[in-house]
Image (tube, grey):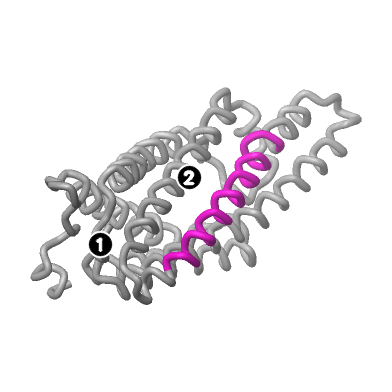
């Protein structure tokens, strides 16, 4: 494979993974119970205990996160086709992406399974045992907040690294890297905010999510375009050289 070219099957798999990730995350997040103040533990625990879809929703979110990681693996592979600074940074981005995937697996185990068991136990507990059951559920909630904070900080770090890698490479337009980096900064701010304030409304969370979706959709188009180019024994570049120089 020559420098500056991407392998079509890997790009196609990555594009499909990113598109499916957006669909799965949007659906699962829309089904997530979110009517109560997330920092009002008695009210929000009752809401969670009454939810029959809680575990399924969080398994869906976990699947969506894993699909995002799959897309990032494909992007990292495509950036590695040029022996430049972008390829070097992409290697660190890949390591961060794998760490993020592990962190989100832990998050969904705590939030989607352990917390659900705890709030169900509290909701069914006899009056003389409710205090202890509530304290146990609340302890799991604090663990969830801590894991959530660091998980989204890792999302931010990963996107920032991939944004830098794209900007330093000539495989994709540099402005696409700027979007990824901006999404990374927003998610870093979100993670720090959760660590200090818990689950409170945050502009950085909305901005980070919106930028991530926009960036992922752009990457779906670019990666699919690369995978659909005629090979003739060797795949073509993602974009014509003229388009790259204007990025």
Query: Which residue is depicted at the point 45% across and 35% down?
Result: 28
Q: Secondary structure at mark 2?
A: helix
Residue under label 2: 65
147 is within the stretch colored magenta? no
Camera-near label (2 vs 1) is: 1
Choose the circle earlier in sequence order: 2 or 1. Answer: 1
Q: Nearer the viewer, residue 243 or 119?
A: 243
Please, which residue is most extreme toward the right here? 128
Position of 19 relative to 160 (above/below)? above
Span shown in magenta: 90-114
Query: Which residue is depicted at the point 63% across and 51% down?
Result: 39
> Residue 144, how many percent across, how many down?
67, 49
Query: Which residue is depicted at the point 70% across and 41% down?
Result: 42
- Find residue 2 and name its label: 1
Judged left or right of residue 158, residue 13 is: left
Q: Nearer the viewer, residue 116 or 235?
A: 235
> Residue 162, how many percent across, how many down?
40, 65
């Amino acid at each position: 494979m020559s420098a500056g070219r991407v392998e079509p099957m890997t790009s196609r798999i990555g594009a499909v993974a990113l598109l499916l990730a957006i669909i799965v995350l949007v659906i699962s997040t829309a089904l997530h119970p979110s009517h109560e103040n997330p920092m009002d533990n008695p009210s929000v625990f009752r809401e969670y205990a009454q939810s029959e879809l809680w575990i399924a929703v969080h398994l869906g979110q976990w699947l969506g996160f894993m699909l995002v990681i799959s897309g990032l693996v494909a992007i990292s592979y495509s950036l590695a086709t040029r022996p430049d600074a972008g390829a070097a940074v992409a290697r660190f981005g890949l390591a961060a992406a794998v760490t993020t995937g592990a962190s989100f697996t832990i998050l969904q185990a705590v939030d989607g399974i352990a917390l659900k068991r705890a709030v169900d136990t509290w909701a069914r507990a006899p009056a003389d045992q409710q205090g202890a059951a509530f304290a146990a559920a609340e302890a799991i909630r604090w663990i969830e907040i801590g894991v959530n904070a660091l998980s989204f900080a890792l999302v931010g770090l990963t996107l920032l690294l991939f944004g830098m890698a794209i900007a330093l490479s000539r495989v994709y337009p540099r402005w696409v890297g700027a979007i990824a980096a901006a999404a990374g900064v927003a998610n870093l701010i979100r993670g720090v905010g959760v660590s200090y304030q818990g689950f409170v409304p945050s502009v950085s969370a909305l901005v980070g999510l919106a930028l991530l979706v926009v960036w992922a959709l752009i990457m779906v188009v670019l990666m699919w375009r690369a995978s659909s180019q005629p090979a003739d024994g060797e795949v073509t570049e993602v974009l014509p050289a003229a388009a790259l120089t204007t990025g």
